[in-house]
Image: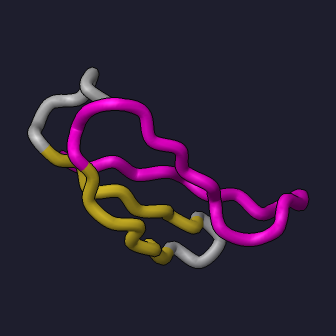
Amino acid sequence: MDKLAGKSIKASWYNPGDGKYTEIGSFENKGVHEFDAPGDVKEGNDWVLVLDF
């Protein structure tokens, strides 16, 4: 994560199907973080990871 500017990163999921965001939380901007999209793995279950700093 240290490739992005800022000390901390605010992460959320965006659901293009309904236009809503689901907040994940804030993380220190270093190291490796894994993000698992909500819902079952199936066609049409599209999520966008949004990282704000």
Q: Is residue 48 above or below residue 24?
A: above
Q: Which one is nearer the viewer's eye here, 37 or 44? A: 37
Please, which residue is most extreme toward the top here?
Answer: 3
Q: How is the image coloured?
A: secondary structure
Residue drawn at x 16%, y 47% as measured from the top left: 8
Magenta span covers which residues? 28-53
Residue drawn at x 39%, y 72% as measured from the top left: 23
Q: Position of residue 19 (x, y in %)?
A: 51, 73
Q: Which one is nearer the viewer's eye here, 23 or 29? A: 29
Q: Which one is nearer the viewer's eye here, 1 or 23? A: 1
Q: Is residue 1 above or below residue 11?
A: above
Residue 5 appears left or right of 21: left
Q: Main secondary structure of the magenta part?
A: loop
Q: Is residue 46 magenta?
A: yes
Q: Position of residue 5 (x, y in %)?
A: 15, 30
Please, which residue is most extreme toward the right here?
Answer: 42
Quadrant (top left/top right/bottom left/bottom right) for the N terminus: top left
Residue 4 appears left or right of 6: right
Find residue 17 and report its image quarter. bottom right
Q: Is residue 40 magenta?
A: yes
The image shows a total of numbered marks equal to: 0
Please, which residue is most extreme toward the front here?
Answer: 31
Q: Position of residue 41 (x, y in %)?
A: 84, 59
Residue drawn at x 44%, y 72% as measured from the top left: 21
Residue drawn at x 70%, y 58% as measured from the top left: 46
Q: Is residue 12 above or below residue 35?
A: below
Q: Position of residue 30 (x, y in %)?
A: 26, 32
